[in-house]
């Protein structure tokens, strides 16, 4: 008999979580203006709002924290982190930041000016925010297949090469760089193939353009390349990572994802001119070049986390749990972005709440319903997160409207996933009765999903 799959780790420490009553949750979500970001953590039973900074660190990471060097300049912890980043990515210049959006802020401050166009595959919220706040345009060049949630193809996060070339021809000198997000979060945690990265590099070279990888989940992307792309079956994750980054000129990273730390990020590149420009901004915005807003202990933990999470067994344990939740939803007939993503299941809210008009935000409505049902906190990746068009100020309804269930690494068991699936099934069973959604009472001009206030449509 073949032995069943089991995780590649064991549990050493636990944290109690509390179930609440429906009555309590109704009060709390009303006080939060129907925005789950405004809930207190103790009001949440199973927290799937993000996998960023919410993972469980290993004993090796915790022990490394005790040896953190907190020197202002030249800390050994920085060099531990830098050496690991260089080993995995091949980039020699490393600038730490306190998290991924800070890395974008520093680097984009050097590269983007008003009127620029930054093509890529579904820029995530902060990436798009940093581009649009500078008066530039984030141009989506993702393959069209990504918009069909029920279509199963192995690399749904790919850049559409024809769209990208059309953009390069049309905008020319207005394009400061191409940005590729691995994995493609907005489209459901979908990976980008090595072949697509290679084609993108060839096209960039043809037009004399640089490429930046938004690399928050690069290790998960490498796992999918190993398991789905012909010719990589026998390559190690670390070997695959080196090839991935050989097609980029620079990377930004939120280390809170695939390095499994609570805080941290960095810029890495082999372009000395980019590094020299970025370190000036980094000192102004984040801190000196060898700490950049991070403690020495966190840099030590980041180095260990990168090492651990670029091993196949660790990634397999993580991604199989995401797949497990997907299979439970399959049993119940609940539609989500297929195939299951690397870090999350993205429920297709427009296919669940078919009677809620798009102007009433189906995915946000489903997010609130799931919280009310079982105290589970997901996150809307859809019409609210898309923000308004910076020119017309109209809502953008051209993308997907998804409820993201982002699973923290090494935190929850499959029993928790069973609860999530059962709660969604209960909502799905009564979906015909949900005919009204939410309307915006107040919103910020940029990145509105974090602070938006909503009320139920009467």
Image (cartoon, helix red, strand yellow):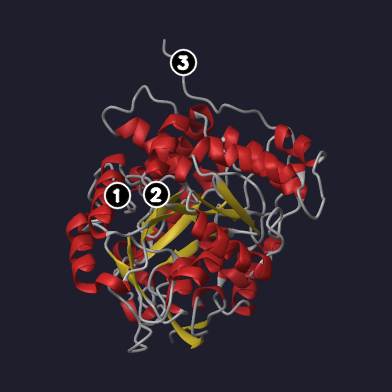
| Residue on which disc 2 sits | 248
- The CA distance from mark 2 to mark 3 is 40 Å
Q: Height in image: 299 above or below 321?
A: below
> x, y percentage for residue 189?
40, 51
Mark 1–mark 3 distance (CA, rounded to whole Å): 42 Å
- Residue 185 appears left or right of 76: left
Residue 21, horizontal then vertical, whole percent: 65, 62
Mark with earlier residue (1, 2): 1
**How packed is label 2: few (under 14 Cα within 10 Å), some, or many (20 or more)?**
many
Of the 4 image quadrants, the one containing the N terminus is top left
**Marked residue nearer the N-terminal end (2 or 3):** 3
Question: Mark 2 and mark 1 in contact (Cβ < 8 Å)?
Answer: yes
Q: Nearer the viewer, mark 2 or mark 3?
A: 2
Please tell me the numbered disc located at residue 201.
Answer: 1
Pick the front one: 151 or 101: 101
Q: Position of residue 214 (x, y in %)?
A: 45, 55
Lower sequence index among marks 1 and 3: 3
Q: Is residue 391 above or below residue 294?
A: below
Dot 3, crowdedness within 10 Å: few (<14), some or many (≥20)? few
Q: Residue at x 41, y 38 (%)?
A: 222
Q: Residue furthest top?
A: 1
Residue 425 visible, this orientation: no
Q: Nearer the viewer, residue 314 or 441?
A: 314
Decide: marks 1, 3 in contact (CB < 8 A)?
no
**Residue at 77% in and 53% down:** 73
Dot label at residue 3 = 3
Q: CA distance from mark 1 to mark 2?
A: 7 Å
Give SS at disc 1. Answer: helix
Q: Describe residue 359's horizontal placement relative to residue 260 as left or right.
A: left
Above or below for 433 versus 239: below
Decide if residue 363 is on the left or right side of residue 315.
Answer: left
């Amino acid at each position: 008999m073949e032995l069943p799959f089991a995780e590649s780790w064991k549990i050493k420490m636990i944290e109690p979580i509390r179930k609440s009553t429906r009555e309590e949750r109704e009060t709390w979500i009303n006080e939060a203006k129907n925005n789950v970001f405004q809930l207190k953590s103790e009001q949440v039973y199973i927290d799937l709002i993000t996998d960023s900074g919410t993972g469980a660190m290993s004993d090796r990471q915790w022990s490394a924290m005790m040896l953190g060097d907190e020197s202002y300049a030249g800390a050994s912890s920085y060099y531990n982190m830098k050496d690991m980043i260089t080993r995995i990515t091949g980039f020699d210049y490393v600038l730490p930041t306190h998290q991924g959006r800070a890395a974008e802020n520093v680097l984009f401050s050097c590269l983007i000016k008003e009127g620029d166009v930054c093509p890529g595959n579904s820029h995530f919220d902060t990436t798009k925010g940093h581009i649009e706040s500078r008066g530039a345009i984030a141009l989506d060049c993702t393959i069209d297949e990504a918009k069909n949630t029920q279509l199963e193809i192995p690399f749904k996060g790919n850049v559409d090469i024809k769209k990208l070339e059309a953009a390069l021809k049309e905008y020319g000198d207005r394009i400061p760089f191409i940005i590729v997000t691995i994995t493609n979060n907005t489209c459901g945690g979908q990976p980008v193939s090595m072949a697509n990265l290679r084609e993108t590099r060839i096209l960039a070279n043809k037009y004399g353009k640089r490429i930046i990888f938004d690399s928050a989940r690069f290790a998960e992307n490498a796992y999918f390349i190993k398991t789905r792309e012909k010719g990589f079956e026998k390559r190690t994750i670390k070997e695959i990572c080196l090839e991935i980054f050989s097609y980029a000129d620079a990377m930004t990273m939120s280390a809170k994802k695939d390095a499994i730390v609570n805080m941290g990020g960095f810029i890495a590149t082999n372009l000395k001119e980019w590094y020299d420009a970025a370190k000036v901004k980094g000192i102004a915005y984040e801190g000196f070049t060898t700490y950049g807003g991070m403690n020495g202990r966190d840099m030590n933990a980041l180095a260990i986390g990168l090492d651990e999470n670029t091993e196949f067994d660790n990634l397999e344990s993580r991604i199989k749990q995401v797949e497990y939740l997907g299979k439970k939803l399959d049993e119940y007939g609940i539609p989500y972005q297929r195939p299951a993503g690397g870090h999350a299941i993205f429920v297709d809210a427009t296919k669940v709440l078919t009677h809620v008009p798009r102007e009433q935000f189906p995915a946000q409505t489903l997010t609130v319903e799931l919280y009310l049902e079982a105290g589970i906190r997901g996150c809307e990746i859809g019409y609210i997160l898309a923000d308004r068009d910076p020119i017309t100020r109209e809502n953008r309804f051209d993308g997907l409207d998804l409820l993201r269930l982002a699973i923290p690494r090494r935190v929850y068991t499959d029993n928790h996933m069973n609860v999530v699936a059962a709660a969604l099934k209960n909502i799905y069973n009564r979906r015909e009765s949900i005919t009204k959604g939410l309307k915006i009472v107040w919103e910020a001009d940029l990145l509105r999903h974090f602070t938006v206030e909503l009320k139920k449509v009467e």
